[in-house]
Structure formats: C-alpha cells, structure tokens
Amino acid sequence: MKLFKTLLLLMAITFGLSSCGDDLPATTPITGTQWQLRNLQNKAGGGRTTTDILLSFERGGKSTITVGFGSITSQSNGSGSNTVRREQETTLTTTYRYYNGGVHINPASMSALTEKVLKGTEVLPIVQQLYTDAILNESKTLLTFYPFDKNKTFSLQRVGR
C-alpha cells in the first residue's frame, strides 16, 4: 500500500509539473509592449491613403498587427467622449522571435475575408514590410525596420507597456 501511495504521489507530481510548464510561456523584454506608426502617407494611382499601424507583442511569441486605413471617423458613445479611428480596420495575428535587442516578425496568416479587404490596396505591401527583422534602440522607444537601407527604413514608436 505504501508503494502504491508513493507511485501515485510521483505520478501526480510528474503530471502537475509537466502541465505547469506549458501554461506560462517565456516572456521577453518586449512582451506586453505596443508600437505604432500613425498617419503614414502613401500616394499611389492618383489617390492618397493614410495608414495607422499598431503592433502588439504578447506572451508566448504571439503578436498582433492592427492596421487602420482610409479616412478618419469619429464616433460618439453617448457619454460625451468620442472614439477616433480609421474608416477601415483589420487585425492580423502572427508570431515573433526576440533575440538580443532585435525581433523577427513572421508573416501573418490571413483569413480569406482579410485578404480580400487588403488585396489591391496600398496597405498590404506596407504590412508585408513588417515581416522581417527589426532592432530596438538603446532606450527601447523605437523599433526600426531595415536599419541599414536608407530607402526602406522606418520606425515604430513605443506607445505602451
């Protein structure tokens, strides 16, 4: 009976520890941060589009990219405050890998509806520019993409933790 209790206890500890390891993924210095680029101007095809990008880094290497484009709209919630947002907005889910002051963002998987909304707009090539390596500046307030290519380089500014 004592052997049975010992085996049962060892089994419970083993299963308990193995399940705990998967619940709390490793965090990085950028976990929980948000980065944005507002009012990115793009002229193409005789028109002008402005785009807002919000990049959020979450636990476990997950990331979301929220892209707003089109004209700015203001919505009142009835209590006197207004919400300002872009006419069209979509959120993409992706993954990232942090390494020694840099981050690599993997391409997002898009639903058919999201792909249909973005296809043919100037927004899709902008979003695709995020699928690369970026570096953090020393004060960790800027995330710079293509830092060594002066024709492509752009930065997202940190807006939240």
Image: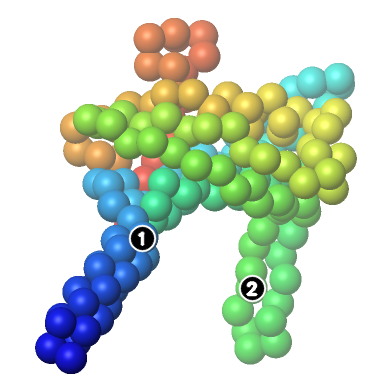
Tag 2–tag 1 contact (CB < 8 Å): no
| The quarter of the displayed image where residue 74 is located | bottom right
Please tell me which residue lies in front, 158 or 66: 66
Question: Looking at the image, which residue is at 42% across and 30% down?
Answer: 104
Q: How many marks?
A: 2
Question: Looking at the image, which residue is at 86% across and 21% down?
Answer: 46
Residue that badge 1 annotates: 22
Look at the picture and state if 32 lies above or below 142: below
Which kind of residue does numbered mark 2 sit on?
Answer: Asn
Question: Looking at the image, which residue is at 67% across and 58% down?
Answer: 85
Look at the picture and state if 105 lies above or below 8: above
Residue 11 in the image: x percent, y percent? 26, 74
Residue that badge 2 annotates: 82
Q: Is residue 153 left or right of residue 160?
A: right
Q: Secondary structure at mark 1?
A: helix
Please tell me which residue lies in front, 81 or 12: 12
| The quarter of the displayed image where residue 129 is located | top right
Q: Is residue 140 left or right of residue 110?
A: left
Residue 84 in the image: x percent, y percent? 64, 62
Question: Looking at the image, which residue is at 30% across and 63% down?
Answer: 18
Evaluate whether residue 45 shows in this view.
Answer: yes
- Mark 2 is surrounded, within 10 Å at the Cα level, by few (under 14), some (14 to 19) or many (20 or more) other residues, namely few
Look at the picture and state if 146 lies above or below 150: below
Which kind of residue does numbered mark 1 sit on?
Answer: Asp
| The quarter of the displayed image where residue 43 is located | top right
Please tell me which residue lies in front, 59 or 132: 59
Q: What is the CA distance from the residue labelled 2 to the residue labelled 1?
A: 41 Å
